[in-house]
Amino acid sequence: QVQPAESGGGLVQAGGSLRLSCTPLRRIFNNYEMAWYRQTPGKEREVVAAIDWRSGRSHLVDSVKGRFTIFRDDAKDTMYLQMNSLKPEDTAIYYCNEFKGALDIAELTNWGEGVLVNVSS
């Protein structure tokens, strides 16, 4: 079973930037709604940003608005998360997957390994 592969994470100082990539997606999921999620130890996975693959319309949670941008390259079947002005509280493992609603994350399957983003203060 093909899984999405996340990349681009790493260690960065607060205020720095990273760009995450995820591919493939449309080849795996029969869904036009895709999203980035993150999880920290002891907490449930949460959605960070979602995008409609057809229109490019996006939605970001309040905690990352103005700092993160989600976009996709249809030709490359790749989704990105541009993260600027990173904060220590952004530290987490980031995953990509289809989006079926913020309350339906537990129902999602076929997760990749995720990528660690570590923001130092």
Image (cartoon, grey):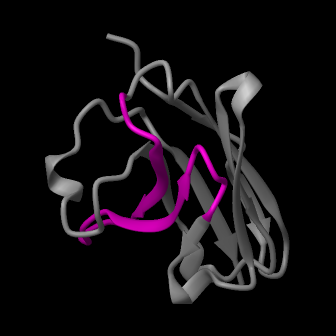
Q: In this view, does 59 lie to the left or right of 2?
A: right
Q: In this view, does 47 lie above or below 31?
A: below
Q: Which residue is drawn at 83% across and 81% down?
A: 15
Q: Residue at x 83, y 66 (%)?
A: 17
Q: In this view, does 9 lie to the left or right of 105?
A: right
Q: Can residue 114 be seen in this view?
A: yes
The region drawn magenta spans 30-57
Q: In this view, does 71 lie above or below 91?
A: above
Q: Where residue 114 appears, x then y in whole percent?
A: 47, 42
**What residue occupies the far bottom of the structure in this picture?**
62
- Foreground residue among 93 and 22: 22
**What residue occupies the far front of the structure in this picture?**
55
Magenta-drawn stretch contains 66: no
Q: Where residue 83 appears, x then y in whole percent?
A: 74, 66
Q: Which residue is drawn at 23% across and 36% down?
A: 109
Q: Where residue 60 appears, x then y in whole percent?
A: 56, 75
Magenta-drawn stretch contains 51: yes
Q: Where residue 33 appears, x then y in whole percent?
A: 44, 48
Residue 59 falls in which quadrant of the image?
bottom right
Q: Can residue 40 be seen in this view?
A: no
Q: In this view, does 19 lie above or below 15?
A: above
